Image (cartoon, grey):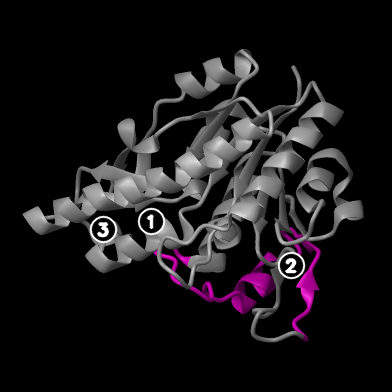
Amino acid sequence: MAELVFVKLGGSVITDKSRAETPRPGVVERLAAEVAAARAARPGMRLLLGHGSGSFGHVVARRYGTRQGVRDAPGWVGFAQVAATAARLNRLVVDALLAAGVPAWSLQPSASARCRGGVLQWLETAPAEEALARGLVPLVYGDVALDEVQGATIISTEQIFAYLARRLRPARLILVGVVHGVFEADPLRDPSARSVPHISARNWDEVRALLGGSHATDVTGGMLAKVDEMVALARELPGLSVHLISGERAGALQAALCDPPDQVGGTVIRWP
């Protein structure tokens, strides 16, 4: 069967996370064009895309505390507003992909997701499987979700990817952010911060101790939570490769989809 690759377009790169509901349309369009070019170069490759909420969902979710749960009427109003805001960004991403010639089909996670204490327990996978079988490119995104313990919560794209990966078994995951991989300190604050080209069983404990949170509003935990989740997934799924790259670098996403990781740079997570 043709290689399956998951790609997340991080909210930090497709939006200005310091300003509420501020997309970066030029970046979104360029990344969509890179996806289209990679599909043309590797026509047998199957893709499942996702994107973060950036300054759309995260800002509203923090205002209402949605990730911590919903227990009253104002909280449920906030829940609905977070969902609507996340969907607005999703529409922009879908439109850019379609304009670039990528047959993207948006799948709303909150329509089926069920959580328990903030942990994703169930998500309908059949639509994504059917879409892939028919040559479509399913697109998921960070969203709200019902929660049997706390009423509601927020599920990140990484949580959704992890759930889908356990069932669909991709060969690779590519996470596209602002910085080119994982660094020992925040390179946006410390230009001398050293990159970490590989994460594995040999150095994970050391790297984990160095990682901090995101530099902007992120209700799903920042860099540490994202890498932690991906390391856990790589440990669970032998052979899976996770590649973290920068979407600020023109051509990096296309290269990551088509070329060996050591030619692209960034950080590669493999286990052991």
The tag earlier along the polypeptide, 1 or 2, is: 1
Range of residues picked out in magenta: 192-221
Q: Which three-letter amino acid code belongs to the residue tagged 1?
A: Gly
Quarter containing the N terminus: top right
* Secondary structure predominantly adopted by residues drawn in magenta: loop
Instruction: Quote the CA–CA distance across marks 3 and 1.
Output: 10 Å
The tag earlier along the polypeptide, 2 or 3, is: 3
In the image, 138 versus 122, the foreground residue is: 138
Determine the residue positioned at 55% across, 59% down: 226
Residue sitting farthest toward the right:
263
Q: Is residue 138 left or right of residue 171?
A: left
Determine the residue positioned at 81% across, 64% down: 197
Kindly report which numbered mark, 3 or 1, lies closer to the viewer in this rendering: 1
Provide the residue designation for mark 3: 66
Q: Is residue 72 left or right of residue 232?
A: left
Residue sitting farthest toward the left:
73
- Residue 151: % across, % down: 18, 48
